[in-house]
Image: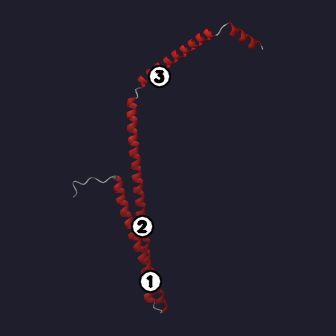
């Protein structure tokens, strides 16, 4: 037992599982290849026995061929199941990663919400609105004062002439 060894991360566990599954699929593929060679050999033997009119040997070899093909089918199904398990592991790891990210995001959103006091924000927005209105009024008064100071009787006469044209 490794008491001081740290627990592997999910990514490491997934990688190790995938490695084992890939190894298992390769072993099954090797076995399938050997069985296919055996199938070809049996077919040749059946043909040779049939040519020699040896019915008993032909029957026994044919039964062996049927069993061999059933074994091939079973191994192919096993390989497909292993590959499916590999896909399920990958999907589960992706789901866990997304779940973790959503958890971190929700914590961040909670922290932001705690920092945002709605009453305080409302007061700040109201104060901003008041100050903005004051600034507008001061701007209008300054504009009116400048217009009054700069405008003389000549400006009013020119304005009247332009309007009458």
Disc 2: which residue = 79
Q: Where in the figure is residue 59, as x and y percent of width and height?
A: 44, 85
Q: Where in the figure is residue 50, as x and y percent of width and height?
A: 48, 89
Q: Where in the figure is residue 53, as x and y percent of width and height?
A: 48, 92
| Label whose residue precedes the other's in the sequence (3 or 1) | 1
Proximity of marks 3 and 1: CB atoms separated by less than 8 Å: no
Q: CA–CA distance between discs 3 and 2?
A: 66 Å
Looking at the image, is 141 positioned above or below residue 120?
A: above
Instruction: Assess disc 2: are there few (<14), some (14-19) or many (≥20) residues with their C-alpha within 10 Å of its C-alpha.
Output: many
Answer left or right for 148 relative to 30: right
Q: Nearer the viewer, residue 152 or 128?
A: 152
Label 1 sits on a secondary structure element that is helix
Looking at the image, is 116 positioned above or below residue 71?
A: above
* Figure quadrant of residue 85: bottom left
Q: Residue at x 44, y 71 (%)?
A: 73
Q: Residue at x 47, y 89 (%)?
A: 48
Disc 1: which residue = 41
Q: CA–CA distance between discs 3 and 1?
A: 88 Å
Label 3 sits on a secondary structure element that is helix
Disc 3: which residue = 125
Q: CA–CA distance between discs 2 and 1?
A: 24 Å
Q: Residue at x 41, y 77 (%)?
A: 34
Looking at the image, is 112 positioned above or below residue 155?
A: below
């Amino acid at each position: 037992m490794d008491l001081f060894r740290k627990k592997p991360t999910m990514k490491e566990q997934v990688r190790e599982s995938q490695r084992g599954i890939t190894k298992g699929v390769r072993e099954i593929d090797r076995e399938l290849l050997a069985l296919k060679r055996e199938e070809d050999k049996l077919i040749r033997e059946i043909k040779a026995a049939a040519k020699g009119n040896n019915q008993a040997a032909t029957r026994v070899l044919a039964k062996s061929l049927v069993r061999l093909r059933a074994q091939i089918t079973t191994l192919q199904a096993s390989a497909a199941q292993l590959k499916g398990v590999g896909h399920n592991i990958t999907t589960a790891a992706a789901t866990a990663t997304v779940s973790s990210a959503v958890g971190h995001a929700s914590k961040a959103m909670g922290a932001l919400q705690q920092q945002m006091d709605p009453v305080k924000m409302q007061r700040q927005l109201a104060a901003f609105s008041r100050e903005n209105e004051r600034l507008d009024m001061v701007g209008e008064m300054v504009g009116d004062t400048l217009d009054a100071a700069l405008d003389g009787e000549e400006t009013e006469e020119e304005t009247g002439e332009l309007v009458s044209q």
